[in-house]
């Protein structure tokens, strides 16, 4: 009888001790357990100054980038012939969100009587979006002069090349080459820049993975009828060497 009573007491004491230890462990775990990790602050993103959502949306398939003769992306050509123009800092981010052959949506101002759009925001096929966030008073990025080897272009004109103001400044070829001649030359050479016209041109520019673009120095329906023109980025004529104004820099204090 005493043996059974002592065994029962020992068993009860063991249960109480085990329960006490478990409770203590749980209490300790509550004090020393892993605390919730603080979420790192999201990276600060530059937001557009204005709400771009009300701007008209133009959507289509990207056919090619429109390059400057210095190799910078100045815009896009869509499958329906629309030419989308954007600032240089926006253009340089385009390959990260959309490639030729993919769909693109553009928030921007549409041209009147011209198939052009001035882009303020561009959305790629995977939902990535870039916007023109440069303040209105910020200096435009510098487009370096085109330097390098002569690049020939021969083929058929696909469409006149416009600028952001809707003025013809050259031609886009069916092989996706871009030929710049400048507004003045484009006016007098309009017949050579019409869609379907054969065109030969040569000038300094770029030719690579993104495409071909040149500032034409010689241009014509073919190589035998080519004429010399002043390139679109040619500096304005100045005083002739040895004259009083030869060493004067236009716009400087000495020129006033």
Image: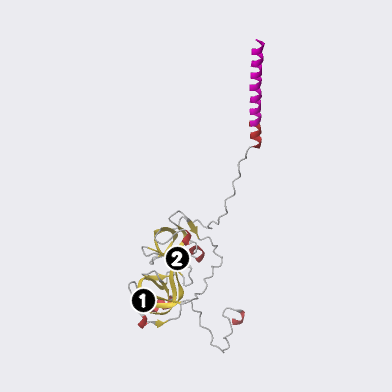
Residue 231 location in percent, x, y?
Answer: 46, 78
- Residue annotated with mark 2: 75
In the rendered image, the vertical position of residue 71 relative to residue 244, given as above or below:
above
Badge 2 element: strand
Quadrant for residue 105, please give it. Answer: bottom left
Q: Is residue 202 above or below residue 30?
A: below
| Spot occupied by residue 214 in the image (x, y as percentages of width and height) | 44, 74
Comparing 7 with 54, the one in front is: 7
Nearer-N-terminus badge (1/2)? 2
Q: Is residue 3 rendered magenta in the image? A: yes
Whether residue 56 is visible to the viewer of this picture, yes or no, is no
> Residue 28: horizontal and vertical position, in percent?
66, 33
Residue at 66% from the left image edge and 37% from the top image edge = 32
Tell me the colour scheme of the image. secondary structure
Q: Where, quadrant-wise, is the N terminus in this rendering? A: top right
Contact (Cβ within 8 Å) of mark 1 with mark 2: no
Vertical placement of residue 171 versus 33, above or below: below
Give the image location of residue 239, x and y in percent.
Answer: 54, 86
The magenta stretch spans which residues?
1-25
Magenta segment main secondary structure: helix
Q: In which image quadrant can residue 166 be found?
A: bottom left
Taking the magenta stretch, the answer to whether it contains residue 76 is: no
Name the foreground residue: 166 vs 194: 194
Q: Which residue ends up furthest to the bottom in the rendered image?
A: 242
Q: Which of the labelled discs sits on residue 26, or is there none?
A: none
Q: Which residue is mark 1?
A: 199
Give the residue displayed 42% in from the left and 78% down from the top: 202
């Amino acid at each position: 009888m005493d043996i059974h009573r002592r065994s029962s007491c020992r068993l009860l004491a063991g249960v109480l001790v085990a329960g006490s230890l478990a409770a203590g462990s749980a209490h300790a775990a509550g004090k020393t357990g892993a605390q919730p990790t603080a979420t790192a602050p999201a990276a600060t993103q530059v937001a557009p100054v204005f709400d771009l959502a009300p701007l008209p949306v133009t959507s289509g398939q990207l056919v090619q980038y429109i390059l400057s003769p210095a190799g910078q992306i100045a815009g896009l050509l869509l499958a329906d012939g629309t030419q989308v123009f954007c600032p240089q800092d926006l253009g340089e981010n385009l390959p990260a969100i959309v490639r030729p052959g993919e769909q693109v949506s553009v928030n921007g101002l549409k041209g009147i009587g011209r198939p052009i759009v001035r882009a303020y925001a561009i959305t790629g096929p995977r939902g990535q979006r870039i916007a023109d966030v440069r303040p209105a008073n910020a200096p435009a990025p510098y487009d370096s002069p085109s330097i390098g080897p002569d690049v020939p272009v021969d083929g058929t004109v696909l469409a006149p090349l416009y600028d952001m103001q809707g003025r013809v400044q050259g031609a886009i070829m069916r092989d996706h080459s871009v030929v710049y001649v400048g507004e003045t030359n484009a006016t007098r050479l309009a017949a050579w820049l019409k869609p379907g016209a054969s065109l030969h041109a040569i000038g300094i520019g770029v030719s690579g993975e993104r495409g071909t673009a040149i500032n034409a120095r010689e241009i014509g329906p073919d190589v035998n009828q080519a004429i010399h023109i002043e390139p679109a980025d040619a500096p304005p004529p100045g005083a002739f060497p040895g004259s009083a104004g030869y060493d004067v820099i236009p716009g400087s204090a000495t020129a006033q």
